Amino acid sequence: MDATSKKAYGVAIIIQLIYTGMYVVSKAAFNHGMSTYVFIFYRQAAATALLLPLAIVLERRNAPPMSFRLFLKLFFYALLGNTLSMNLYNISLKYTSATVASATSNSVPVVTFFLAVLLRLEVVRLRSPSGMAKAAGVALCLAGVLTIALYTGPSMSPVNHHRAFAAHHPHPQAHADGGGKGTWMKGTFLMLLSNTTWSLWIVLQASLLKEYPNKLLSTLVQCGLSTAQSFLLAVAVERDPAAWKLQLDVGLLAVAYSGLVVTGVSFYLQAWCIEKRGPVFLAMSNPLGLLLTIFCSSFFLGEIVHLGSLLGSGLLVGGLYSVLWGKSKDHLHQKQSQEQAPKTLNTTSNDDDEEKQQPAAAVQNTGAGDEKQLKDLFAMEASPLRHQSG
């Protein structure tokens, strides 16, 4: 194993540790009574404050113009992929656990693939091994969510009873009674809905990047718009002025950590990791984050992990790997077809036929590029990095 590969594995572990910290610290803040709506506003504001100077320094001379139509499109994308998705996510995190949040993040690539199929951006050939793997991945993902939502099973005791983020008035365990069971189910399906809106945002980004290829400015504008949207939503929901006060507690830690560390540090590390080893490598490291979250949430929060959550997590991880395997097989087949195309052109003796084949090959390569771009997008977002861009 060369030095770059060793470094890539180390970076992937650091990324998963960052996300583990995000799940645990955010859950701790909500357990201490912090409003999820106010949290989103402060987090988005912190992310915008981080991205704005970077955009000024790096893009002030070559920023492409932005039409009003494009601005409206970015407003809608910010509402869908940031404001709506993140608020649903944090509400569901408050209702469930950090383990469920980490487990369901594995469904993002699967849901993205499913939406891409519905929008005819992906093709599934069910008679091929890759097609069957993709279909099985979608089925495993659905089974995993249903298992987490509907099946409790025996529980595992917390690793540490003297937890660091103990709340003065902790929320009851989700499975403690019938009402808790209903809250747990609602939270699980809200988490799935959050992942679905985020996945739809990922699919829409493929066309957005063609129209406006500057990723940093696009992210900054969407993050800024989401800050304004989140503020209006929080003002409408939270009427108590005390809910807006930040103190030196876990709430302030959660805002700073999510807005700066997750947005800044993990954004750079993920970009580096994808550049060196590809998006699939990063997506396949997600189950490590799940294991870390199970341990840390039990150790620091005293969360009780149930067998149903573990079984559902296993099904979600299986669905993730199944879809990624099918995508890798398609990518390998496509690469082999592209390598064989020049040979076919060279062995053709008819000049007219060559002129007809070359444009066709160009069209094929263009389609391949579009598919690769979409593949990179949904694999890169294997974690709900609604969390990455703020």
Image: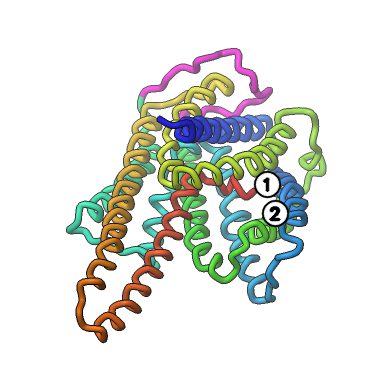
Q: Is residue 78 above or below residue 164?
A: below
Reading the chain from its start, which is encountered first: label 2 or label 1? 1
Q: Position of residue 128 (x, y in %)?
A: 19, 56
Q: Position of residue 52 (x, y in %)?
A: 75, 53
Q: Residue at x 37, y 74 (%)?
A: 363
Q: Is residue 121 left or right of residue 176?
A: left
Where, by quadrant of the figure, is residue 350 drawn?
A: bottom left
Identified by mark 2, the residue type is Ser
Residue at the spot 66% in from the left edge and 25% down from the top edge: 169
Q: Nearer the viewer, residue 320 or 159?
A: 320
Q: Amino acid at mark 1?
A: Ile
Residue at screen point 52% across, 28% down: 173
Near mark 1 (Cα within 10 A), the count class, few <14, some 14-19 or many ≥20, is many
* Residue 322 visible in the current orientation: yes
Q: Which residue was labeled with disc 2?
A: 230
Locate residue 295 relative to residue 86 in the image: left or right.
Answer: left
Q: Is residue 312 above or below residue 297?
A: below
Tell me the colour scheme of the image. Answer: rainbow
On screen, residue 147 above or below 124: above
> Regarding mark 1 in the picture, which secondary structure is present there?
helix
Q: Which residues are magenta?
A: 154-179
